[in-house]
């Protein structure tokens, strides 16, 4: 529950995501853009609630992460501060403006809040966004708790304006979705509108791009110096002959166990990147062993051997002392700290049946999957390529209705590939929001090459999986849109996924499967969660 | 059977595993306890589950209350004072977090949305192996309170006898949460709280 107040030095309980959003407000952000994705969604929801209350900042969902970041670049060029929010895989979509955005002359601070999902609670991979910051050669801040998530935002915007580059703030699921009291500061005023006085630095034609690249490379030394003196990189002395390096949440898991360590190792916590090389060298000096605890890939651990001046034994994920897969927790770091496992206090029952997530009872997708199954029945070989949303759960038995989930928008393009490889009955199943995010470009390929693909757009009017955010365009816009893109009007069919229409829907889908060209079937019925939310908002 | 308590005399620490099935209101239960604890001057950390799991899957939340600072958002294994579950199977799922004299407090009614849910006999046998297991007839108590949907508040009430939070502050928190819905709704939720508390207290007495 986002707190309503923004008074100076109040203490409110906030999710990590909300704390970060509050920090952005306090840092004078003017515009925020994003695309919903667990675990980042609550950042924008908090900002949107703030906008509703106070009129500022502007907080908007965008069609996808790439447009969101490009919109933010436009804000920055005009001198104002901009925040972009996304989940980790969203940064793959926004990678183009991100890498190139490091080359332009950032004016108003530009901060990306990117939420990684170690453990893959709600994602298809565990990618570590620190590598992206490193790849783009821009600073990265990594909060270790809710208070830092709030406080770091001021620094993130300042760093961005000081060095004229975007700054990435890396969240992880456990911080994004954990609530703690946070002290809020006095808000800083927004920047005035002031267009860049260096427009040439925004035109990355090769000659200019070479200059900008040169500048980014020479800037690296200053970014490293900023990290050396950063308040987010903290050393705590100890009396053991070995030391512990932590980043992000790993700090807390170490501190949870530290009282049991005697003698206690010295501790270096890193919250600002690029890595503070001198601090790491100082810390390592005279130590026989370094333990590295970090959430995500072994980013620090992999770089340490190249940084340290003498050979020190390094233990962490790469060395096999800490699990490489999944999240850290207060227990799975005990081995590397040479603490015994906490024994199970009680006999734990073996083999309890799992309880995987499933579609809501009465969900429109269930009816769509039923008529899809019946329409394909007996047609021989087929591919049902699908996408990301609630309907992804259709992959699980007993439905087993879809066969692929790779990345946002891939359903249509993969069905195109399958059809061109010779597969009959190539079907794409995609949600309305995912279609607008990145399915449309695949449809352009379909239309341009007249590929025989049958596309089912599951139009439930909302982004269901992430808690029913509104889609970018209303349902009524979908059919004209696909017709406008060149799908013949007679092959754009709108159906209602309800049991009473089942037989009609099977017949319509079969007709379109028979048609040797592109057809789009819009299966339209409201998400129940969305309807519930609408009702809740309607009652005072 | 001491659940949370003022361990060592003066420090308060209460680590709670909250669990259930997506849609059962696990997060609401957590929010009430967390808000009341904060109002009572305790440090609170609450790790929640959002996203995919909320669609009818197993939902787990770690709630840590303390009068000193809390380091980690997650509770170490074998250290939870209380498992508070909205249905029995989910409570059993997180037993490795419970300390040896901890309490497993669960609503009695199974949530059946999977085909291989254990039979009542098997479930009973598993619960019997847990000395601190207590089942609350949450749905019938909610019915009694005049609000079938107050199962959450029944469970908050049942948990309240193990929480280091004053009942008064808990009542006050609930009253504030439901204030906009009118006095009647507030009163019924408070009734549900008391029914849950009485049920848990009676069980605690009979098993001690
Ligand atoms: S949230 Fe909406 S779309 Fe998702 S499963 Fe429930 S009803 Fe279906």
Image (spheres, coloured by chain):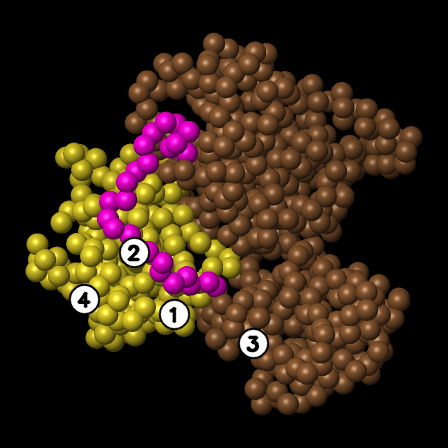
Residue where numbered disc 4 is placed: B195
Q: Is the C-beta separation of discs 4 and 2 under 8 Å?
A: no
Q: Is residue A455 left or right of residue B138?
A: right
Name the chain under label 1. B
Label 4: state its secondary structure: helix
Residue drawn at x 24%, y 61% as measured from the top left? B126
Question: In which quadrant will I find the C terminus of chain A?
Answer: bottom left
Q: Residue at x 52, y 16 (%)?
A: A312
For disc 2, the marked residue is A349
Colour in which chain A is shown? brown
Circle 4 packing at 10 Å, graded few (<14), some (14-19), many (20+), is many
Closer to the observer: label 1 or label 3?
1
Q: What chain does mark 3 sit on? A: A
**Which of the chains is yellow?**
B
Q: Secondary structure under badge 1?
A: loop
The residue to which callout 3 is attached is: A366
Residue toward you, A158 or B100: B100
Disc 2 and disc 3: Cα gap in Å? 34 Å
Badge 2 marks a residue whose secondary structure is: loop
> Do badges 1 and 4 share one subunit?
yes
Residue B116's disc number: 1
């Amino acid at each position: 529950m986002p707190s309503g107040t923004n008074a100076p030095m109040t203490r409110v309980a906030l999710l990590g995501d909300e704390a970060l959003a509050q920090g952005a407000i306090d840092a004078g952000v003017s515009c925020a853009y994003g695309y919903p994705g667990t675990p980042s969604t609550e950042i924008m929801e908090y900002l949107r609630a703030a906008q509703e209350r106070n009129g500022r900042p502007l907080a908007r969902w965008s069609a996808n992460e790439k447009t969101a970041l490009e919109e933010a670049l436009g804000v920055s060029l005009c001198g104002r501060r901009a925040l972009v929010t996304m989940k980790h895989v969203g940064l793959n979509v926004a990678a183009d403006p991100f890498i190139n955005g490091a080359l332009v002359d950032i004016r108003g601070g530009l901060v990306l809040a990117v939420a990684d999902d170690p453990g893959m609670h709600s994602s298809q991979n565990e990618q570590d966004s620190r590598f992206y910051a490193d790849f783009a050669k821009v600073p990265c801040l990594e909060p270790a708790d809710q208070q830092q998530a709030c406080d770091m935002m001021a620094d993130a915007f300042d760093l961005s304006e000081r060095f004229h580059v975007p700054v990435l703030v890396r969240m992880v699921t456990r911080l994004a979705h954990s609530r703690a009291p946070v002290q809020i500061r006095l808000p800083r005023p927004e920047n005035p509108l002031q267009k860049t006085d260096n427009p040439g630095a925004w035109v990355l034609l090769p000659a200019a791009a070479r200059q900008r690249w040169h500048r980014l490379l020479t800037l690296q030394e200053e970014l490293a110096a900023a990290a050396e003196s950063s308040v987010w990189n903290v050393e705590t002395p100890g009396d053991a002959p070995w030391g512990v390096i932590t980043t992000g949440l790993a700090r807390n898991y170490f501190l949870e166990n530290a009282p049991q360590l005697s003698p206690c190792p010295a501790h270096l916590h890193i919250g600002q990147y690029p890595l503070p090389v001198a601090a790491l060298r100082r810390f390592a000096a005279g130590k026989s062993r370094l333990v590295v605890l970090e959430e995500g890939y072994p980013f620090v651990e992999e770089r340490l051997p190249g940084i340290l001046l003498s050979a020190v034994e390094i233990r962490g994920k790469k060395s096999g002392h800490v699990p490489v897969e999944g999240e850290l927790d207060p227990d799975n770091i005990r081995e590397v700290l040479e603490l015994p496992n906490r024994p199970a206090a009680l006999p734990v029952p073996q083999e309890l049946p799992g309880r995987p997530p499933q579609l809501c009872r009465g969900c429109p997708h269930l009816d769509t999957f039923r008529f899809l199954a019946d329409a394909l029945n007996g047609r021989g070989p087929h591919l049902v390529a699908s996408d990301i949303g609630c309907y992804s759960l259709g992959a699980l038995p007993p439905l087993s209705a879809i066969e692929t989930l790779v990345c946002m928008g891939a359903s249509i393009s993969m069905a195109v590939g399958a059809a061109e490889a010779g597969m009959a009955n190539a079907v794409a199943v995609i949600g309305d929001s995912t279609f607008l995010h990145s399915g449309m470009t695949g449809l352009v390929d379909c239309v341009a090459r007249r590929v025989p693909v049958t596309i089912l757009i599951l139009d439930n009017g909302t982004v269901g999986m992430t808690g029913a955010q509104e889609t970018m365009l209303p349902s009524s816009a979908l059919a004209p849109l696909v017709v406008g893109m060149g799908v013949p009007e007679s092959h754009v069919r709108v159906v209602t996924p309800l049991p009473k229409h089942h037989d009609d829907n099977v017949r319509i889908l079969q007709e379109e499967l028979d048609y040797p060209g592109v057809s789009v079937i819009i299966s339209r019925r409201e998400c129940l969660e969305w309807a519930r939310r609408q009702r809740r908002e309607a009652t005072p | 059977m001491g659940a949370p308590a003022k361990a060592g005399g003066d420090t308060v620490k209460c680590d709670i595993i909250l669990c259930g099935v997506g849609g059962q209101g696990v997060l609401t239960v957590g929010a009430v306890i967390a808000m009341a604890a904060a109002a009572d001057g305790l440090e609170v950390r609450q790790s929640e589950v959002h996203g995919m799991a909320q669609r009818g899957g197993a939902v787990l939340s770690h709630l840590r209350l303390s009068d000193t600072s809390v380091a980690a958002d997650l509770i170490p294994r074998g250290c939870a004072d209380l498992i508070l579950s909205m249905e029995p199977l989910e409570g059993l799922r997180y037993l490795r977090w419970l300390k040896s004299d901890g309490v497993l407090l669960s609503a009695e009614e199974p949530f059946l949305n999977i085909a291989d849910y254990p039979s009542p006999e098997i479930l009973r046998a598993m619960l019997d192996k847990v000395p601190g297991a207590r089942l609350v007839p949450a749905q019938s108590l909610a019915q009694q309170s005049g609000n079938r949907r107050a199962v959450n508040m029944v469970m908050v009430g049942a948990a309240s006898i193990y929480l280091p939070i004053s009942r008064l502050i808990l009542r006050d928190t609930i009253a504030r949460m439901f204030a906009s819905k009118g006095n009647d709704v507030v009163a019924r939720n408070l009734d549900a709280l008391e029914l849950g508390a009485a049920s848990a207290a009676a069980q605690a007495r009979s098993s001690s």
